[in-house]
Amino acid sequence: MYKSYFLYIVLGGVFWGGTTVLRAQESMDLNTYLDYVKAYHPLVKQAQLKLSESQAKLLKSQGAFDPKLEVDYKDKTFQSTPYFERLNATFKIPTPYGLEFQGGFQEADGSYLNPEQAVSGDQLYKVGAQIDLGKGLWANERRTALKQAKSYTKQAAEENALQVNATLEAASHAFLEWYRAHQEYEVFDRFVTNAAFRFEGVKSRYRSGDLAVIDTVEARIAYNQRVLGRKKAQMKLREKALKASNFLWIGENAVEIKDEVSPQFDPLEFRQNFQPLNGSIEDHPKIKALGYKQEQLVFEKRLQRNNLLPEITVGYQWLSETNPTQQLNWAIDPDNSSTQFKLSLPLFLRKERANFKLARIQLQDIELERKQVETLLSNKIQALANQTQLLEEQWNIAQRMVLDYQALFSGEQQKFEAGESSLFLVNARESKLIEGLLKAIELNTQKQKAQTSYYFQLVFPDTNPAL
């Protein structure tokens, strides 16, 4: 069905002013309408872009652990005298646990070479590692950033589901309002036909002397009232069709629904498709997104707590004049080595203590927010369930009232035809019937909107393959 509607729109649409005009197909149902919203609506695409953005940030944080090759070459010649020529190449492999493996070689030569940089032989090879035994051992900025990026990607997926569902909910409501306006127009159109038929009958009976001329005036007033009602319903139908058009896109082009297109609605299919599943409030994307945000703050708190420790860096490298890649039994001689030790600790730790305190405050704040959101969501879902049930009961009462209004109108019309009633009473009964029909349509639409809101609070793209 989806592909067939797509062909109808593409073949039947004309591009004018950047808008695709939907004309060729005669009707559109809710499922097809939502298919277009999910496939092309900018907000849905924007939600996907945010998810892609989070994945790009994850890739960026993973790049902090990419192996790194550094080459440093310097030389100086002055008045034909080679002062020095130095080459230092290093290959580093960082790890998430504060340990960094290193390897490289050096070349140095020249008349005025710094003795500290002198190299015996042609080249000097080095292999070793460096480790942070202090604040960078259990938590460091690179590892924390990577964990937070992974958590943020999951958070973005949940927020993506929220935005998609919010768009689908709003689109469903727009379609249901369009369908309501269409039903109301059909009601007025039917009663315009009835009023016109009755007006002609009254005029015929007046000509035959069966009715007074005042009855023709009464019939004409009733007819014009129905025509005015239909005009207002037609204007409302066009307005709701345009609002429903706000959610329809084909590619990069907005779609405008023309008057020839009518909404199609199957109540049984609607009940089956929008029957919410039983789920826990903990599985709600908003709660899960806050959970991932809380997880990121836990990582931040752990990092700031670790920053209270001193910075202790220890490095060790074995040195050799022999290329280790060309000699399998390359000897590790502890007499040929270089060591490094660094200790750094701020005396008052004011910055570190403040950052740790801020991290704790932010974590407490998100915990309170999560509890509040859980309560609000639980109450909202319960309210929507109650609202759906109560509107169902009201709609059933309204339907029974419509049947009673119909019986009164039919009886009054029969009495009028038998000469036992007046045209005024017939019109009054008809007006009450129209009011009852419009009220039933209104309650039915409110019920359906409440059901879709209830559904989209419980069913999300990751739990429903149809979305």
Image (cartoon, rainbow, N blue to C red):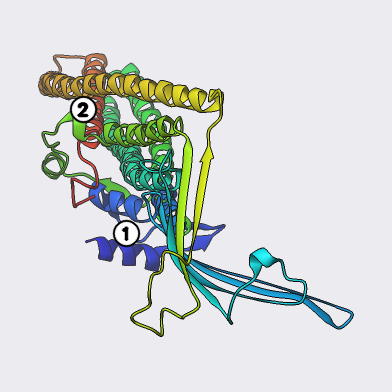
Could you say which is closer to the camera, residue 437 or residue 264? 264
Which disc, if any, is residue 211? none
**In the image, what residue type sits under mark 1?**
Gln
Residue 292 visible within the image: yes
- According to the picture, the residue beneath numbered tag 2 turns out to be 447
- Residue located 31% across and 24% down the image: 370
Along the line of sight, the residue nearer the viewer: 73 or 419:
73
Mark 2 closeness class: few <14, some 14–19, many ≥20 residues within 10 Å: many
Q: Specify the amino acid type for callout 2.
A: Lys
Judge whether residue 417 can be spotted in this image.
no
Q: Position of residue 250 (x, y in %)?
A: 41, 59
Above or below, 319 against 170 in this view is below
User: Considering only vertical position in the picture, is 133 above or below 32?
Assistant: above
Give the Cα separation between the discs numbered 2 and 1.
28 Å
Q: Earlier in the sequence, mark 2 or mark 1?
A: 1
> What label sits on residue 25 in the rendered view?
1
Element assignment for label 2: helix
Asked if residue 319 is positioned above or below residue 228 in the image, the reply reads: below
Vertical placement of residue 105 versus 208, above or below: below
Q: Position of residue 255 (x, y in %)?
A: 43, 54
